[in-house]
């Protein structure tokens, strides 16, 4: 078990951790699922979190039992349609949409000399950071196009640690998705879940309210 004093950096997911873009992803996928005649439910919504754009579409098709219905070109078209809708939704984001306490946490990390990197599967992450005026905090961002495997594979979290010259064991990973927590754990980082502890059962600790994400509270959890 990693000790708090060994931690030198924090790897962040973005959607659903720093801001509530998870709801926009869900809204845009829900619209597409309805168009394709696939029933939307909480299990599908939760399972989609953290998955790459194409993996998300594949899961929706599978959920509707129509995974063999479309060819690659058609799938590409549907994924683009979702993304166009999603990009429209994120235009409304402003710094006021940063989750409560997260800007304070980023400042606490910066002041404490912790390194930070972004491990988001989203190709829209740089645009979102611009809208939230957080670009300066994340000089190191894993390029999702460079990945061979999406979450729950640990690849993105290992790369995020490499970008800040740290061993995975020296990093905390923040995630709102079951797939993301699995990836952090498989990367041998300490997993910090944002959301429901009944859902993020594999996380090393879970915060239901981002206001409580502080180094002091993380330290307390790690010493339990
Ligand atoms: C994040 C979100 C997922 C999304 C993925 C790809 O991991 O949690 O819901 O599917 O990024 O995002 P993109 O913006 O590239 O479609
Ligand atoms: Mg997320």
Image (cartoon, rainbow, N blue to C red):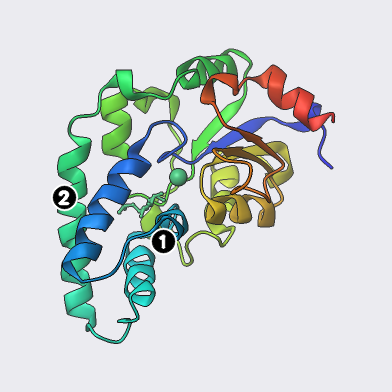
Give the residue at the far bottom of this rendering: 68
- Quarter occupied by the N terminus: top right
Indicate the quadrant where residue 99 lies.
top left
Dot label at residue 187:
none
Rendered location of residue 11, percent (x, y): 56, 38
Of residues 215 and 62, the one drawn nearer to the viewer in this rendering: 62
The residue under label 1 is 44
Q: Quadrant of ligand 2?
A: top left
The spot of residue 63 in percent (x, y) is 38, 72
Earlier-in-chain disc, 2 versus 1 = 1
Tell me the quadrant of the picture where the C terminus can be found. Answer: top right
Residue drawn at x 47%, y 62% is 150
Q: Nearer the viewer, mark 2 or mark 1?
A: 1
Q: Is residue 93 left or right of residue 44?
A: left
The image position of residue 77, as x and y in percent, is 15, 69
Mark 2 C-beta closer than 8 Å to ligand 1: no
Q: In the picture provided, is 142 more to the left or to the right than 8?
A: left
C-alpha span from label 2 to label 1: 19 Å
Q: Are marks 2 and 1 in contact (CB under 8 Å)?
A: no
Q: How busy is the neighbourhood of tag 2: few (under 14 within 10 Å), some, or many (20 plus)?
A: some
Q: Is residue 137 visible?
A: yes
Looking at the image, which is closer to me, 81 or 150? 81
Helix, strand or loop status at disc 2: helix
Label 1 environment density (alpha carbons within 10 Å; few <14, some 14–19, many ≥20): some
Q: Residue at x 40, y 41 (%)?
A: 15
Above/below status of 224 relative to 80: above
Q: Quadrant of residue 153?
A: bottom right
Q: Label for residue 85?
A: 2
């Amino acid at each position: 078990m990693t000790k708090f004093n060994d931690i030198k950096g924090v790897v962040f997911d973005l959607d659903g951790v720093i801001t509530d873009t998870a709801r926009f992803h869900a809204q845009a996928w829900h619209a597409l699922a309805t168009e394709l005649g696939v029933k939307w439910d909480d299990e599908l919504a939760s399972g989609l979190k953290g998955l790459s754009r194409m993996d998300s579409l594949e899961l929706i098709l599978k959920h509707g039992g129509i995974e063999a219905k479309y060819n690659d070109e058609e799938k590409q078209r549907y994924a683009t349609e979702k993304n166009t809708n999603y990009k429209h939704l994120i235009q409304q984001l402003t710094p006021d949409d940063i989750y409560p306490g997260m800007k304070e946490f980023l400042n606490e990390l910066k002041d404490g000399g912790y390194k930070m990197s972004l491990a988001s599967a989203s190709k829209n992450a740089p645009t979102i950071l611009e809208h939230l005026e957080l670009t300066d905090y994340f000089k190191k961002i894993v390029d999702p196009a460079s990945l061979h495997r999406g979450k729950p594979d640990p690849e993105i979290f290992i790369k995020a640690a490499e970008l800040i010259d740290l061993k995975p064991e020296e990093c905390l990973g923040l995630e709102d998705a079951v797939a993301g927590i699995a990836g952090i754990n498989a990367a041998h980082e300490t997993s910090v879940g944002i959301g429901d502890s009944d859902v993020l059962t594999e996380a090393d600790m879970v915060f239901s309210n981002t206001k409580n994400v502080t180094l002091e509270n993380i330290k307390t959890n790690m010493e339990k």
